[in-house]
Amino acid sequence: MKHFFAEGKWFLTPCFVLAILVAALLLYLPKGDEIVFIHTQQTHALNVFFRVVTSLSEWPITIIILIFSIIHGLNKGVLLTLTTLLNAVLVTTLKKGVFAGYVRPALFFEGKLALNFVPGVEIYKYNSFPSGHTAAAFALFFMMSLLVKDKRLSLVFFLVATLVGFSRVYLLQHFLIDVYFGAILGAVVAVFCWQISKRFSYFGTSSLAQNT
């Protein structure tokens, strides 16, 4: 466990701080107030920026990252791929099974408030909880932070994952609570896969971090 915290502290520390701040915000804000505020703050530049950011955890980009990681080192690629797939299975089970009735902002505010949806973004109305994009980002980028030798990159990975999560709220696709628990789910999946990999010498997590 000490080895895990040594490898992950550059991602985990800001993650814990952000988790506490967002939890306090969730306790203070009624559900939907964040959407009401954000939809009045949109600009063309931010629309373009967050459309790009949100794509960083979608399958085309994820597959490119996984292929590159496999080419760079088979063990790293396999571990990242398994982390991504496990996360996808869990998110799908929760979104379309356990929490299938949770609606997204588009339906939540239908007939109440005309939201300014970003052009070019497909609008969904159901399967809101948890945020799949956010879970995917935190699972993938947290695992990458555990594997890289230069731990300063962990801060970059954390920033990217956080921006992906915020993009889901900015694009009016999810509530803050969806993003919050999506981030937790993704991080937990990464931790689980990292710990399991240590039990199998094939993955060699200690050598992965050293050789990256």
Image (cartoon, grey):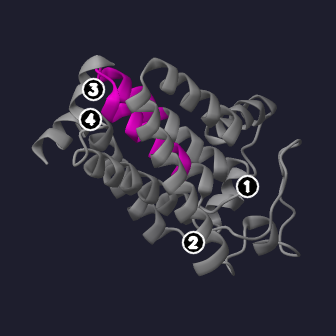
Q: Which residue is mark 2?
A: 94
Q: Which residue is mark 1?
A: 172
Q: Which-is-in-front pick, marks 3 and 1?
A: 3
- Give the residues drawn in magenta, as a range: 135-159
Q: Secondary structure at mark 3?
A: helix
Q: Earlier in the sequence, mark 4 or mark 1?
A: 1
Question: 107 or 205: nearer the eye?
Answer: 205
CA–CA distance between discs 4 and 3?
A: 6 Å
Verify whether residue 63 appears in magenta.
Answer: no
Image position, residue 63 (x, y; %): 63, 34
Which amino acid type corresponds to the residue marked 4 in the rendered image?
A: Thr
Q: Residue at x 55, y 57 (%)?
A: 179
Q: Which mark is residue 194?
A: none
Instruction: Give yes or no for contact between labels 4 and 3 (Cβ–Cβ under 8 Å).
Output: yes
Instruction: Give yes or no for contact between labels 3 and 1 (Cβ–Cβ under 8 Å).
Output: no
Q: Earlier in the sequence, mark 4 or mark 2?
A: 2
Q: Earlier in the sequence, mark 3 or mark 1?
A: 1
CA–CA distance between discs 1 and 2?
A: 20 Å
Q: Secondary structure at mark 1?
A: loop
Q: Which mark is residue 205?
A: 4
Quarter of the picture holding the C terminus = top left
Q: Which residue is mark 3?
A: 209
Label 1 CA crowd tier, 10 Å (few <14, some 14–19, many 20+)? many
